[in-house]
Amino acid sequence: MSLNKEVQLDDVIDILREKIDGGGTVTFTPKGTSMLPMLRDGKDVVVLKKPDGRLHLFDVPLYRRDNGKYVLHRVIDFLNDGSYVMCGDNQFSLEKGIRDDQIIAVMTAFYRKGKAYTPRTFRYRLYVNFWYYTRPFRRAYSGSKRRIFKLFGITPKPKEERKRKKKKKEDDIYD
């Protein structure tokens, strides 16, 4: 019997907070693409716990925006008023002014295909530093690619079509 059930975070936030405030950890599978390539939509599992004091650079907290939406993004800077600047790994727009009272938990590990990755490992730190410090170049590349496509009248294929072609190619290989 499987105990896994897909629920909205709003439906279980009180239980999650109780568990975290009691010193426990919570695991869940995040949805969305804002933390790609580190966290894949609906595939990877994150482990969260209550932060030990203030967050540090590159921590990945779960926080609640003022509009009520829950977000799992990376700390990339600090403001003079003590608030944080957050950004998803797959995003370029910065979210400024996240306060400590909005922070619910911080990621201590994530699992991909059953293998654990923690922020203390060399491989993880290498990824974070590479991803952070190449951000300006990735943004320039992304913008240039769109402009070149537009200049030559190229319309990128929809994501679903690319997935179908990839799946068909994989199926052909294994047939």
Image (tube, rainbow, N blue to C red):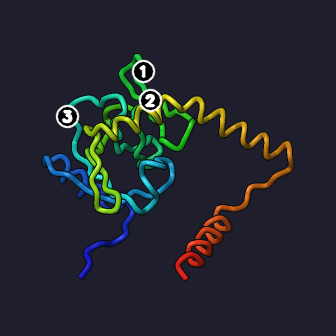
Mark 3–mark 2 CB contact (< 8 Å): no
Occupied quadrant, residue 172: bottom right
- Going from the N terminus, do you reach mark 1 or mark 2 first? 1
Q: Closer to the camera, 147 or 53?
A: 147
* Residue 94, position as x, y percentages in the image: 52, 33
Identify which amino acid the numbered label 2 is placed on: Val
Q: 91 above or below 158?
A: above
User: Which residue does the image show at 42% across and 21% down from the upper left?
Assistant: 79
Residue at mark 2: 85
Residue drawn 48% across the image and 28% down it: 133
- Give the Cα separation between the discs numbered 1 and 2: 7 Å
Identify whether 161 is placed above or below 129.
Answer: below
Q: Is residue 78 left or right of residue 56?
A: right
Q: Depth check: give the residue in front, 4 or 63.
A: 4
Q: Are marks 1 and 2 in contact (CB under 8 Å)?
A: yes
Name the kind of residue labelled 3 in the image.
Asp
| Neighbourhood count class around disc 1 (C-alpha, 10 Å): few under 14, some 14–19, many 20 upward | few
Instruction: Give the residue displayed 30% in from the left and 72% down from the top.
Output: 4
Q: Quadrant of residue 57?
A: top left
Determine crowd level at label 3: few under 14, some 14-19, many 20+ residues with C-alpha closer than 10 A. Answer: few
Residue furthest to the left in view is 22
Q: Which residue is mark 3?
A: 52
Q: State the residue position of label 1.
A: 79
Distance from disc 3 to disc 2, alpha carbons, whole Å, reads 19 Å
